[in-house]
Amino acid sequence: MTGLTTHVLDTAAGLPAQGLRIDLFRLSGDAREKIASVVTNHDGRVDGGPILIGDSFQVGEYELVFHAGDYLRAKGVALSEPPFLDVIPLRFGIADVTAHYHVPLLLSPYSYSTYRGS
C-alpha cells in the first residue's frame, strides 16, 4: 500500500478519537496549499482510505493540522482558555512515493506524540 494515512487515539480516554477534524496542506517555501479536510471515524481513522494516494501523493513537504481543541471541547473536556493544546500542526516530508506514510497522533489535553507508523 502506498499513500498517506493517519490515526488519532485519545490517550486520556483510552479510545479512538472520533470526530476530530484534520486539514492537510502541501508546503512550498512559505506557501501552504490546503489539499484535504477530513474527520476521523469511530476508529480514529479516515474513511475512504489514504488521505493522499495516486497522482496526489507526491514527493514534498506537508503539514497535517489536527483540531484537538475543538475535539476535546466536543467531548466535554474542561479546558483552560486558551487551551494548552488547540491546533496541532505536524510537518513532515514524503521522499518516496512508492512507500506508505502513516502519521498517527496520540492525544491528551496536555500532551501529544507522533511517529512514522506502518
Image (tube, rainbow, N blue to C red):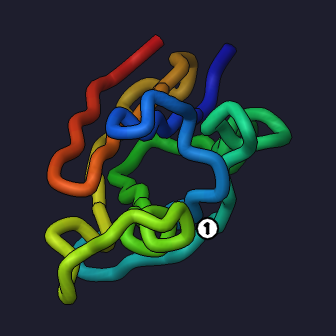
Q: Is residue 112 above or below residue 3?
A: below
Please name whichever residue, 92 or 45, is drawn nearer the observer in this view of the structure. Answer: 45
Q: Is residue 25 at all visible to an observer of this figure?
A: no
Total numbered labels placed on residues in the image: 1
Circle 1 SS class: strand
Image x and y of residue 7, in percent = 53, 34
Neighbour tally class for label 1: few under 14, some 14-19, many 20 plus, Cα within 10 Å: few
Residue at left 61%, top 67%? Answer: 35
Residue 10 is at least partly visible in this image: yes
Left or right of 112 on screen, residue 45: right
- Furthest-right residue in this view: 48
Residue at 84% from the left image edge and 40% from the top image edge: 48
Residue 33, x across and y down, in percent: 49, 76
- Does residue 107 lie above or below 22 as drawn? above
The residue beneath circle 1 is 35
Residue 57 occupies which quadrant of the picture?
A: top right
Q: Residue furthest bottom?
A: 81
> On the image, which quarter does residue 1 sit in?
top right
User: Which residue does the image show at 29% across and 46% down from the upper left?
Assistant: 108
Q: Amino acid at mark 1?
A: Ile
* Relative image position of residue 31 (x, y in whole percent): 34, 81
Left or right position of 70 against 111: right
- Image position, residue 39 (x, y; %): 67, 58
Above or below 96: residue 71: below
